[in-house]
Amino acid sequence: MRRHEEHVAAHADALRNVILAAGIWTTPIVVEWEDLIVMDGHHRLSVACAAGLSHVPCLMADYRTVRVETRRADFVVTPDDIRKRARTGALYPPKTTRHHIPAEWNAACAIDLDLLRVMPALNYSLANGPHRDVDGRCAG
């Protein structure tokens, strides 16, 4: 998965503590289908990497069904701008974009974290995905 904006480390740490204490993953990451760009879930992706998960639950989407806007007047945000930043690594500052996920997509899950660490490869995994840096480390 590819990020398009930075995340707040303190928020990711707090979220990691909540997820690890619960021992289950409850909210899927929303990912743009074509380029595997995180639309919603940058902090959760960071938690997944820190927790050593090889897989995470995701909802696949596209920019025909998800509207995006900027939260900052000093940045232009379009799907093309997001793709460019995700591909080049020139990430927006935290909370620059706001993706409007359709309310009917509010999905919940309850997957034991141990299963996400050892789940066999289905068709895409965190272990091999483009979110890894050039040294193979998790870029989360």
Image (cartoon, rainbow, N blue to C red):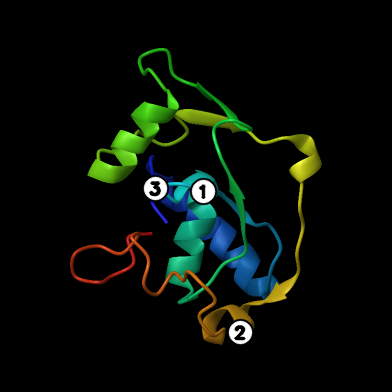
Numbered circle sitting on residue 71:
none
Q: Nearer the viewer, residue 10 or 53?
A: 53
The percent coordinates of residue 93 (x first, y second) are 36, 34
At label 3, the amino acid type is Arg
- At x 42%, y 45%, the residue is 7
Alpha carbon separation for disc pair 2 and 1: 26 Å
> In the image, is residue 53 above or below residue 97?
below
Q: Nearer the viewer, residue 34 or 73?
A: 34
Circle 1: element type = loop
At label 2, the amino acid type is Asp
> In the image, is residue 21 above or below residue 2?
below
Indicate which label's residue lies in the foreground, 2 or 3: 3
Q: Is residue 66 left or right of residue 8?
A: right
Instruction: Kindly tell me whether residue 24 is visible in this rendering.
Output: yes
> In the image, is residue 114 above or below residue 127?
below
Circle 3: element type = loop
Quarter of the image for residue 103 reads: top right
- At x 57%, y 83%, the residue is 119
Say whether disc 1 or disc 3 marks the residue closer to the N-terminus. Answer: 3
Circle 2: element type = helix
* Quadrant housing the N terminus: bottom left
Numbered circle sitting on residue 3:
3
The percent coordinates of residue 21 (x first, y second) are 66, 73
Instruction: Kindly tell me whether residue 89 is visible in this rendering.
Output: no
At label 1, the amino acid type is Trp
The percent coordinates of residue 29 (x first, y second) are 59, 54
